[in-house]
Amino acid sequence: MTTFYQDPLHVVRGEGVWLWDKDGRRYLDCYNNVPHVGHCHPRVVEAISHQAGTLNTHTRYVHDLILDYGEALTAKFSHDLSSLLMVCSGSEANDVALRMAQAMTGKTGIIGTDNTYHGNTAAVSQLNSSKVPVGGYQDHVRQVPAPDNMAPVGGTREGQAEAFAKGVEAAIAELEANGHGVSAMILCPYFANEGFPTIEAGFLDRAIAAVRRAGGVIIADEVQPGFGRIGSHWWGHERLGFEPDIVTLGKPMANGHPVAAVVTRPEILATFQDAFKYFNTFGGNPVSAAAAMAVLQVIEDEALVANAQSVGDYALSSVNDLKGNHDVIADVRGVGLFFGVELWRDGKPATDLCAAMVDEMRDRGVLLHSVGRYENTLKVRPPCVFSQDNADLLVQVMDDALRAVG
């Protein structure tokens, strides 16, 4: 496995937004979205412990908790996304979503972006841009140019939505010409791995309309922006103002317990089951359902969506204040508790500088990482219990680190 940092971090304990290494040093965690409600949240720990001490089996047996959780989760969605299938990872969820699209449409073509990541299965790895699959990309996959702040598709930020849509339309034409047709377009509605470019509601409207005219469905990969991280909405697709046919969930769903899900309309799930007869031994087991339910309840009870909005606004404003002091900061962007700083030097992406910053900040006790086509954007995505005091520490350390390595 690859590890973070030149000197890999050996962590032994976590609490809230903090991690401790084997030598007892404390680090501010500004990167991990898996512990969505904070590392080792006591209510999640108790839910897991209690259920593990009562019953844990697979979903061929009837169990109330998975139904209770399914109803609580799907209540957070609109436009008839009322059916739930639970799995163990975001990769599995996206793999299932692609098969749902094939079952629903009878077609096999898939459209994603050219700078994305959707998981590790054989099917979804065809969409990943960082490594070309052995034998090359298969003929049923098309990758369209991803939106970008510094190098917008089509050349201008104003014309980027139209240019992106033209890329999707060209992909549709190719897939129809080669006989695959279009089963789905799959996108993270925050374009997280693309470097979360600044886009507004309506950006995807023309592209989505083109996919639907071609008979395809829309899959929203909410593994990173979901569960209120972006502050203004529970889900990234709500912020962009579109209604996906299928939503996939993963990492933050149960605060580190391996839980993921696919949420869709009843007729799509029924068609999928008829075509594939899918079963997942551990997906939706009682302990997983208990952990996921506890996370939902903590998000509500501790008002973490509102916290992501208020603290995120404060943090982004504070990071913006650094631009005047550091010429290497080319762009500061994001929403809620998901934001970052893009670094350029001498008119080029400052990839090496960004890597040095990641290690320098780690050495100063703050954990974050990089993202984007050139890995030149500092990525900040902390647990959603992040506070203004935490943001102040992040900004101070970032300022000091930039002075040290810039």
Image (spheres, rainbow, N blue to C red):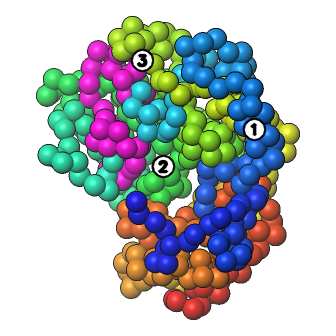
Q: Residue 49 carries which label?
A: 1
177 to 142, vertically: above or below: above
Q: Residues within 10 Å of mark 3 (few under 14, many from 20)?
A: few
Q: Which mark is residue 191?
A: 2
Q: Residues within 10 Å of mark 1 (few under 14, many from 20)?
A: some
Residue 218 % position (x, y)? 44, 28
Range of the magenta residues? 97-126
Camera-side residue: 80 or 41? 41
- Tell me the element at label 3: loop
The residue depicted at 15 percent of the width and 27 percent of the height is: 177
Residue 89 % position (x, y)? 50, 38
The answer to whether residue 340 is visible is no
Please identify the quarter of the rendering in which residue 29 is found: bottom right
Q: Would residue 331 be counted in the magenta stretch?
A: no
Q: Please, which residue is most extreme toward the front here?
A: 53
- Tell me the element at label 2: loop
Q: Separation of disc 2 and disc 3 at Cα?
A: 29 Å
Q: In which quarter of the image is the N terminus?
A: bottom left
293 to 196, vertically: above or below: above
Q: Earlier in the sequence, mark 1 or mark 3?
A: 1
Q: Earlier in the sequence, mark 2 or mark 3?
A: 2
Report whether 172 appears left or right of 96: left
Amino acid type, mark 3: Tyr
Q: Would residue 114 be counted in the magenta stretch?
A: yes
Q: Which mark is residue 278?
A: 3
